[in-house]
Amino acid sequence: ANQYFQQIYQSEESAREVVKKLKQFKVSGSARENDIFACMIHNLFDEYRFFSKYPEKELRITGILFGLLIKEQLVSSITLGIALRYVLEALRKNPNNNLQSGKMFRFGMFALEQFKNRLHEWPQYCSHIIQIPHLKDGYAALVGEIEGAVDDNQSAASSTAASAAGAATTSSATEAGRKGTPAPASSTDSSAPPPNQVSIGGFTGGIAASLNSLSSAGNTGPSKIDLPAPAIPLKDRRKAVFGPDLGRAVNAPEKSDESDSDKNEAPPDAVLDRVQFLVNNLSMSNCKEKSNDLREILDRKYFGWLGNFLVVKRISTQPNFHALYLSFLENLGEYGRGLVEAILASVYVNVGKLLRSQKITTSTSERSLLKNLGSWLGQITLARNRPILQIMLDCKELLLQGYETGMLIAVTPFVAKILEGAKNSIVFRPPNPWLMGLLSVFRALYCVDDLKMNIKFEVEVLCKNLGVKLEDVPMRTDLSTRVPPVKEKNPDFNLKASSAAATPSKAGQGGSGFNANAMMPSPDNKSSSASTGGDSTRSDGTSAADDQQQTVIPNLAAYVNVNPNLTQLFLQVQGGPLANNISADVLRKTVPIAVDRAIREIIQPVVERSVSIACITTKSIVTKDFAMESDENKMRKAAQLMVANLAGSLALVTCREPLHTSISSHLRQLLTTAINNASAGTTVQLRDQETSALDQCVAICSTENLELGCMLIEKAATEKAVRDMDETLARDLQVRKTSREKTGQPYYDMSIFSVDGQRYPKELPDALRPKPGGLSSQQLMIYEGFQRTPRLPAPAQSSDLTPGIGSDSATSDGSSLASPTGQINMGAMNAIALKLDKSVSTLLISAGPRAQEIHLSMIPAEHEIKQLIAAIPRVVNTSNRSLTSAETDLILSFSQVIFKRLYEVSLNERLKLEALIAMLELLNKACPALGRDMCTWATYAPTKTDGQRKLHRAVLLLLVRSSLIKMEDLDGHLVNNIDEGRDQVWLEFLFLFVRTACLEKIGTPATMPKMTDVIRKIAVDKSPWIPDAFQKAALRLIEELRNSGINLETDVLSPKAHVATLQESSSISPESLSTLSGASLAIAKSSQVFSSTDPPNARSLVTEILVQWLRVHSEAAGNEQVLAQFLHRLQQQFGVGTSDAQTERFLRLTMEVVVESCVKNAEGGAGLNYQAVDGAVKMLSYLVKFTSDGGATDQGQHRLVLLNNVLGVAARSCATSYEKAQQLKTPWDQRPWFRLLLEMLTELTQNDQNLDSIKGGMVAMFGSAFHVLQPLVVPGFSFAWLELISHRLFIGNLLLPKDRKGWAVMHELLIDLFLFMEPHLGKVELTPALRQFYDGVLRVVLMIMHDFPDFIAAYHLSLCNVLPVTCIQLRNLILSALPKGVQLPDPVSTQFKIDKLKEITQSPLILSNVTGPINGFKSSIDGFLSKQQPSNLLLNLHSLVRMDGKSDAPVVNSLVLYVGMKGIARLQSEVESSVGHSPEMEVFHKLMEADDFSRYITLNAIANQLRYPNSHTHYFSCVMLCLFNESKESVKEQITRVLLERLITQRPHPFGLLTCFIELIKNTKYDFWSHSFTRCSSEIERVFQNVASSVGSTAGDSTHNQIARVSGITQTA
């Protein structure tokens, strides 16, 4: 922006060239150019205060630039008002006072010179100019010329309107209009201005000459002024004509009906009758059949006649059957192509006729026909990807000319219906340029002031159908280049007629059926002229009978509410025009006028739309339901009730917001005018304090009278709907009456069952289908339920309760709040409740994210909330008397409403809950019966969902704290709900209630003995039907309360009640487990510390950046250059990617904002909206792709650093979000975080030349982020985490590369997974959630084993280390992994000998850390195996492998494998060595001498090495058989148990396990079947027989089938 200013002042570019660029920037779709435009305007306005210090040359350039901005309409609305005010202020500076004033005056003259041809648009502004004293004295000629120009322009405007209206009737004017040029000026016209001067209303040179004389007199400026190019004289401006350049459809010469019939040859009468009969009986069910009939009946030469017939008689009048006719044309196929063209030609002809019609702006029927043709035209062209040629119909020019000539009321619905066809198009749907250009015109028209609501409604409906937001449509259409329309008597605009008050009876006329006289009866039977209130003379001396100071709606002022305390707002502003000129009388006069104008502005479109929808809906339903009803009175009453309810409700919801806005706008305008008029017509500038007081006054008045306006509009809609419904059903009602009177038989309307293409009522179930005899009494009650309670306006003088505005409205004893009769004023109670709810909501909204931290105790006593609560005792003032039964019932009814409101509040709105409880607490003091009923009400509270139960618990605790409910009463109620522990939902509720009540000191164990007794019993000796989880929860609760000083019972935590905790059932150390489980809390605390340094506007700034990005990405999807520019600006301006602190803050706030947006969309019951999340992922992905540190090399490393920051922030933000939800005990949704990480993984792992070189590093960083979010850290993220680590893009990119760099990452994640499952897998039963999660774990392991078996086989040791001994199936799955290329022989074949396999000499790949767990005594093991030293190793071996008194499985697993590897090495190096006589075997035998559990761990460790054919499998198979042969009977039994329990589970079974067991049972050397443990019971004997037969039954199968059946392993390709 500064660069452009520099070019102007250095004369590199002229002011006009820069203004031309600014015009392009304003309508550009580029955010950067829009920012430059806004910045230049802002800078220029901001420099205004320094203009008096500018040198003369720069002052002249600045004045010209300032004036050109106004001339070229680059500023509008508020900005235009500021610009004009600046020029006016400059002109008011007396040039003779001092140098600074002279400069400012010359600036004003320079600027005025540029936009003088627009002065006629602002007559009041001209009046201010000509009233400047020194301008009158020194430049009288100039002032006179401006006055003459204003008069000339007013006459020119009227003559232009008249000539535009008459142009359509004269052929010469029409022809001139088609050429698009004004009539040439006479060459002898002496009034034409010279080329270097600008004309205003026909005179020349006045301002320029005055300015030249002023500059020469001051001797400080240049002697010559360069004037801008001449503008078009006002009297020669172009006239608006409808028709030129709209295309052949509109510009074609009109033809009579006779000429049309002559052109389209009609078929013979016989054929014509058959075709018409065919069309009349056409339906969706016989469409194909009828199309075949037409081929046989009609020759192609008659298509012109048929096309015209269909358009005129069917398509234009039957929009509901357009789909039928389109289907009919499609079934005609190639034969009907000519018919489609004939129909299209006829559509264009008839569209032209309607557009040229003189009645199109006044006739509803003609506009309806045009709208129907537009709908058909869009469906037959755009919907079929066929364009509408500009040569036939220029839709854009049609809209613009409609704007100029007052035909938008007809043109807008027509074009909108055409464009609706684009929603089903592939070519013409957004962002098609042709479509977006038309939408740009629609948006420009939508923003035109005073445009009728029904035209704007058409635009809104179009955007909704196309799925486009109106505010997102770029503004590329400049209406300033078009002829401005004359708004007076223009059907497109809704102006406030100045003469409306003179003829109030006309307000009831029009389409809405709104009758002002019928709406508002006079409450005091006074005349309508007197009801406006006040004297006939206003305080400013003008007459109150002025047209603009009366309401069209009679008696409205008697119902309008003007709070008398509002004037205190103005008195607080000491002095000034606001306090001096706005009094109570002014408000009583202006507020009714504002309400009246607002109602009349919106009532017609609202009522028309509501009544239309209600009537169509009611007729369809009533005619169906009452088809078998002969009593017309029942049908009429039901229809009236239903249509009145629907129309009134629709009107109410439609008008509320527009009416509120309109009242505020009109009232502000009227009050501003009153202030200006009282100041001798000059524009008064209010101070900020005065402006704030005025806005507050307007807001209060509009809010207090909103219900009155809504009631009037609702009443008008209801009355018109009833009238229209009676007219619509008149025929049906008359038929029933006639049938009953003439025949005496009931009338049945059977036509509803024979309508083709209509599903209902034919497809309704029998119970809902109409039956003879009419509706039953129960069915009629549905219609009676539509009965509306009449809404009556409150009298204007009844509003006295205005806390916070002034204290005079209530006396100190509160008497003004009480009823005059001494009874309780329930109206005041309702008012307090409503105002309290509004005040609390306002405070919570202003608090933003910290709203849930606000409590009632934090509110100061002078705050409005506390004052409203304190007002309740004054309303319920019963200190000197007792309540009557009626008053008690009133308070109980009111309290019950408040109590129900408690369960409609969100749990996050803590302040609102406490405020409502405070109201109930004060009411309870006045009415003791309330406390007795409160506990009963609580038993019926909604508790179906988890959220409702959380809210119920919070409400109960607040009620107990406020002594509204006794804890003793709740104690029994909650214990009864748990049903002795069978109702687990209420049992969990009881646990949480007791915990919160004790910790927050709301209750003690003594006040809830029954609940505490339940907890103690569950902890010590629970019932069998109570899950174990509740026993653990009870123990934890007791321990937590004991730590807080609350001791339920001393012996509860005895060894008898001890159960295994998570630490005791996990294989990792308690310290590590504590670190992992507390990681999310540590992350949350660190994030909170960092977020505390955020600037106040950081979150809003990030939100704005995200909104801009979503818009840019949507508009420039696929254009990476545009997206890269946006991200480059993000890096440059906000330091993202360059500054670590800025990057961290931006990423964290981005993720918080998008996740919060996603979750909020689902709070109303809708699904999650991932649009913001996906957009943020796109931005972050592009940021990683296009980031650069400025160097030419090693960009990949820089991208990895940024990705590391992104994923690190994502992981920390996710953990922080989870921890906050846990602390607040609110549900936490893992889906947005899952979507964010998954989409980022998808975006960055796709093929991209910028990222291919670092793909391995990126995937590893994703693995690190997933490691941080492991289930032990964030349990609530477990399911999403499992889905992420098993995703094909992640696991494939990790495990597919041959360098195995990603294997360690995947191994770490699987360890994280098994560590989380380890404590749960040791249990007998899993919860439903854990069972589903375990199924997912099995599938993931199966998938990895199938696709990457080498990976599983290489890490089998460490994976088995973290599995509990009871998890046999998952262990078998891991041990069955078969590396690619390994062939499995048949283990049951008679030729099979494991010693003969060549694979037994090959060692498997082991990537697990074998020596890690035994590093402490590895050197001793090595010494013993090599030199039998130290000799006492075997004596101390058991103590070396123990931890906490029992064998440590990971240590034993590593020891067994390490010793076995040493033994294999010995066998391979020493020829005479054997398995049975070696130091390694001594170690194994020593391990067999331990206790049963330790021996079981050792045998499992040996069985873990019985896998696919390799040296380890062969060696450990020999070890197992040797131990069986040489050990005692108990060891043999335990070996059999280890092998058997792995074989009786579901497949797969490891190959080595099978071969070992087969060798054991078949080799007579081991005499397996002679041992007694094989026959200790019939069940065990049966198991052995089944296993043996299963193994032996495969002998006759092929090798592949044997393996498949015995081991369950499928050969991996």
Image (cartoon, grey):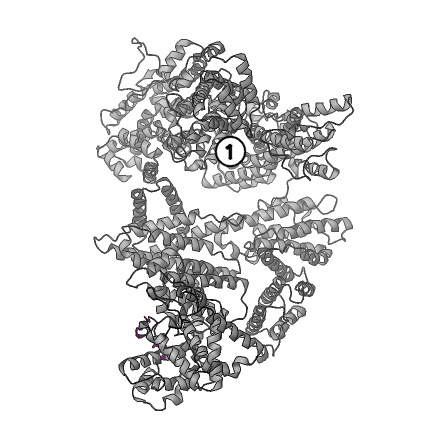
Indicate the position of residue 1028 as horizontal and vertical percent values: 58, 70
812 to 1386, vertically: above or below = above
Is 1533 in front, or is 805? 1533
> Which of the 4 image quarters holds residue 1259?
bottom left
Image-quadrant location for residue 979: bottom right
Q: Quick check: can you spot residue 1313?
A: yes
Q: Along the horizontal axis of the image, is 1515 left or right of 986? A: left
Image quadrant holding the N terminus, namely top left
- Name the element at disc 1: helix
Q: Main secondary structure of the magenta part?
A: loop
Q: Is residue 223 left or right of residue 1308?
A: left
317 vs 894, nearest the viewer: 317
Q: Is residue 1259 left or right of residue 1528?
A: left
* Whole-percent x, y for residue 1066 in the image: 46, 73
Q: Which residue is mark 1?
A: 665
- Highlighted range, magenta: 1401-1415
Amino acid type at image mark 1? Ser
Image position of 845 with respect to 309: above or below: below
Residue 1408 magenta: yes
